[in-house]
Image (cartoon, helix red, strand yellow):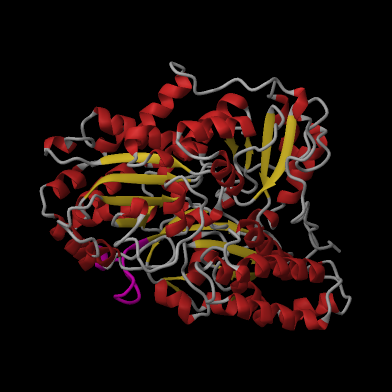
Amino acid sequence: MGYPYQPHHRETTVLSQYFGVAEARTLDGWKKRGGYQALEKALGMAPADIVNVVKESGLRGRGGAGFPTGMKWSFMKQGDGKPHYLCCNADESEPGTFKDRELMRWTPHALVEGCAIAAYAIGAETAYVYIRGEFTEPLHWMNEAIKEAYAAGLIGKNAMGTGKRIDVHVHKGAGAYICGEETALMESLEGRRGNPRIKPPFPAVSGVFGMPTTINNVETLIAAIPILMNGADWYKKMSLSNPKSTGTKLYSVCGNIARPGTYEVVMGFPFRDFLYDVCGGPLPSKKFKAVIPGGVSVPIQSMEEADATLMDYEGFVAQGSMLGSGGVIVIDNAQSMVAVIARIARFFAHESCAQCTQCREGTAWTTKIMERIRDGHGTTEDLDTLLDIAEQMTGKTICVLSDSCATPVVSGIKKFRSEFEELIQGRRFHPVVSAVA
Amino acid sequence: MTPPPEILGGLESPEYASHDRAAHAPYAPVFVAGSAARRELDELMPRYPHKMATLLPALWILQRERGWVSEEGMAEVAALLDLTPAYVKGVVTFYTMYHQHPVGKYFVQVCTTSPCAISGAEEVAKAFLRHTKAGELGVTSADGRFTVIEVECLGACGFATPVMINEEFIESVTPEKVPQLLSRLA
C-alpha cells in the first residue's frame, strides 16, 4: 500500500511499491527505479512476441470483466492498413474502487510506459487515456508525465530513437459513470453522448473512430511492465490458488473497516486474513455484517461466504460474488442493508444513460421502492415486485448497467431478507451496537 | 437507537436550481482568433482524426473561461466544430460536470454514494449546507459564493468523505473539518 499506511508484511507490492514516494512521479525518479526499461525492451521485440509473453503470463483484465489480456491484444489484426487505437480506461467510477487513482497519482510514468508498450504490441500509433473529470490530481500528474516523456523522446514520432511513432494523449471525461463501459467510453471520446454501443462489432474490429481498438484498464496496462521485465513464469508463480488467476491484484478497501486504502496481494490470498489481518478488521466494538467485494455491481457476500473466499476470479464466484474491479466495500452491523442497497440503486438510477427502457425505468422504480421500504412505507408485495423488476433488468439491455443495479437488490433480498421484512412490518432497523462517539 | 440514514435530495433533487440568468453579463465569445483559448483548442485538434472529438475538451475550456456553459457558448462551440447547437446541447446535458446554469464562486461537491454514505458522508453534506448558508442542495448561497451538491462517487472511497471545491480534491473530510476548510476561501 504505502499510502497512507506502510505496506503490510503479507502484501506483495509490485504495482503499488512506490505509492507515497513523491519522487517516483518524476521522470528521473521513475528511471532511477527501472522505469522505461520495459518499453526499451518491448521496442526491440516483435509485437507478436510481446503479445505471447502477456498471453503466457495469464494476465487478465483488471477493470472488472477479467478477460485474458494477451488474447484481447491478439485480436488486433496486424497489417490491415487501418489505423489502430489503444484506449486506456481510467474512468474509474465504480463505487468502492479507487486503485487506478492511486496508480496514476503516484506512478504516472508507469501508465505512460504501459500505454506505449501496449500500443506498440497492437500496432497502434495513438493511445488515449480517458480519465474521469473529477480526478484532478491524476489528471495533473498524467499530463506532467506525458509532457516529460515527450520532451525526453521516450514517446512521440520517434519513440526512444527507434523510428516508431507512439503518441499518448489524456482525454478528460465530464462526469458520467457509464463512460467506464468500453463502447460508451469510445462514443464519449468521439465527442458524443456516452451511450453504449451494441456489440458486435467488437472494438477489435470497429472501435473508436470506427477503427480497430483495444481498451484496457489502468492496472492491466501497468501490470504488463513487470511481466515484460521478469517474464511470464515469474508472474504465473504469483498465485496461491489456481492457474487461471495469476499475478497480484490491487484492492481498494473502504467502508466500515479499521484501515481503508489500496492493498496489493497475490491471487488466491485468503479473504478472511485480508479483511481481519491486512486491513485491520472491524472498527472498535463493531462486527462485519456483509462485504461487497468488487464494486457495487457485484453480488453482496454474507460474512460466511467472505470468510470462505480465496481472492481470485474463480474464488469470488465460488462464494456467491465476483472479483469485479477489486473495490471491497465492508459493511458493519451498525448499518441497515436496506439503506445501503437503496443508496446503490439511486446511484444506478442517476447514472443510467436512459437508452434502454429496462434500465431507465427499472433503475428508477427500484430506487423508489427501495427508498419506500427504507422509510418504513414498504409492503410485503414490494419484495416480489423488486425481484420481478430485477428479472426484467437482467440480460436484456445493451450494456450491463441494468444488470448491475439488479444484482445487489437480488443478492440483498436473498441474503438479508429479514432486514427488509422487519422494516416492512413496521419495526425500524436496530443497529446491534449503538453508535460510539 | 439510530434511525436509518436519511438520504438528502432524491431523484428530483433541484440541482443548480435557482439563478437569475439575466443578472449576468452579455455573452462575449471565448474562442476568438488569436485568443489563448483558441490556441489551446487548435493544439488539441491534431490529436484526433475528427474535429468532433475535441467537443468535450472545448466545452471544458469554455466552462473554465465563462464559469458555466450557456446556450450562446454551445452555439459558439458548435460553429467552430461544424456541429449544430442542438447536437452540442445534447452532449452537454449528458454529462453532469458541465454547468448549465451559473453556480457559486465555490462549487462544492460532496460524495454521498454508498461507501461514503456508510462512513458518515451525509453529515458532511449537511455541515457544508449549514456553514456555507446555501441551505439547500443545488441552490447558490445568497452572497453568490457557494453552491453545494451531492455527487455520485468521486472515486476516493477509502478516504471518506472526499469533497471537491472547484478543482481542489480534498480527502477524509468530516463535519468538524468543514469550518476550517471554508475559512481558507476568499
Q: Where is residue B136 drawn, in percent x and y?
A: 82, 42
Specify whether A400 is left or right of B111. Answer: left
Does A242 appear in magenta?
Answer: yes
Rendered position, B146 above or below A109: above
Magenta span main SS: loop
Residue B89 in view here: yes
> Residue A129 lies in what quarter of the image?
top left
Rendered position, A42 above or below A343: above
Specify whether A98 is left or right of A74. Answer: right
Q: Where is residue A229 drawn, in percent x and y?
A: 19, 52
Foreground of the two, A161 or A274: A161
Specify whether A316 is left or right of A365. Answer: left
Rendered position, A216 above or below A37: below
Q: Furthest-top residue in view?
A: B34
Q: Furthest-right residue in view?
A: A426
Q: Where is residue B66 drawn, in percent x and y?
A: 61, 25
Instruction: Please give the count of numbered marks on the rendered protein.
Output: 0
> Residue B186 lies in what quarter of the image?
top right
Q: Residue at x 81, y 35 (%)?
A: B134
Q: Residue at x 70, y 31 (%)?
A: B102
Residue A21 in view here: no
Does B19 appear in magenta?
Answer: no
Q: Residue at x 30, y 61 (%)?
A: A204
Q: Residue at x 31, y 46 (%)?
A: A127
Foreground of the two, A309 or A124: A124
Foreground of the two, B22 or A52: B22
> Residue A297 lies in what quarter of the image?
bottom right
Q: Where is residue A125 drawn, in percent x and y?
A: 23, 45
Q: Over which residues does the magenta segment extend?
A: A235-248
